[in-house]
Amino acid sequence: MRRWERRAAGALAIVSTLAALAACAPEPVAPTTGPTAPSASAAPTAAPEPTLVPDGSAADNLPLFTRVVADVWGSEQRGAGRAYVDALVAAGFDKAAMQVTRDVSTVGNAAESIQFSVRWGEECLIGQVGPETGDPVTSVEAAIDGVCLIGNTRPIDW
């Protein structure tokens, strides 16, 4: 047997032994008694509902913004920019600080995605939804010259 054949055979033997030992290792078991054991009657605790933090940062308000966007996305109004604006206003965000893109393309088709924003100081809470987007996307971005969305946006005149 050549030297490289002996090394390959030795390496294969080591790998086979390790695989056999790993297959024999017992599965870890969670404790069922004692102070750290989960209680059968303990209900999972729900995360607190996000709320508007008027004196907070944009990042502080992102959880509420994200929840509102998800709620509208899960509704029949998912493709209507006005629905996002109205829901954000109902949650306490300032309508005068918002921007939204159009729901319909220049040729009359439903928009592939809709973007909307709330300016928060020098930052922006930005959301994007639509059939081409997949799940709703939200983020905090820096404002550019005092605006959040660049380009042709829809007037919020309702």
Image (spheres, helix red, strand yellow):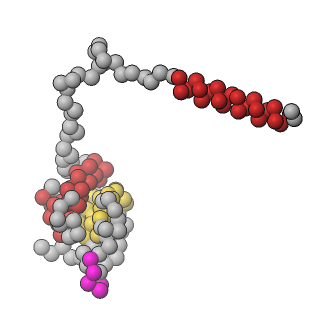
Residue most extreme to the right: 2
- In percent of width and height, residue 57 lies at 28, 50
What's the magenta region? Answer: 106-110
Tell me the quarter of the image containing the N terminus. Answer: top right
Residue pictured at 21% horizontal, 59% vertical: 74
Residue most extreme to the front: 1
Residue pictured at 70% horizontal, 29% vertical: 13
- Residue 8, visible in the rendered structure: yes
* 105 horizontally vs 45: left or right: right
Tell me the quarter of the image containing the C terminus. Answer: bottom left
Q: How many numbered marks are there?
A: 0
Residue pictured at 35% horizontal, 68% vertical: 132
Residue pictured at 29% horizontal, 75% vertical: 111
Residue 109 colored magenta?
A: yes
- In percent of width and height, residue 54 lies at 20, 50
Q: Quadrant for residue 21, please give it.
A: top right
- In percent of width and height, residue 60 lies at 28, 48
Judging depth in this view, the residue of 43 and 127 nearest the camera is 43
Residue 137 colored magenta?
A: no
Q: Main secondary structure of the magenta part?
A: loop
Q: Is residue 69 above or below residue 130?
A: above
* 51 horizontally vs 20: left or right: left
Q: Is residue 89 above or below residue 30?
A: below
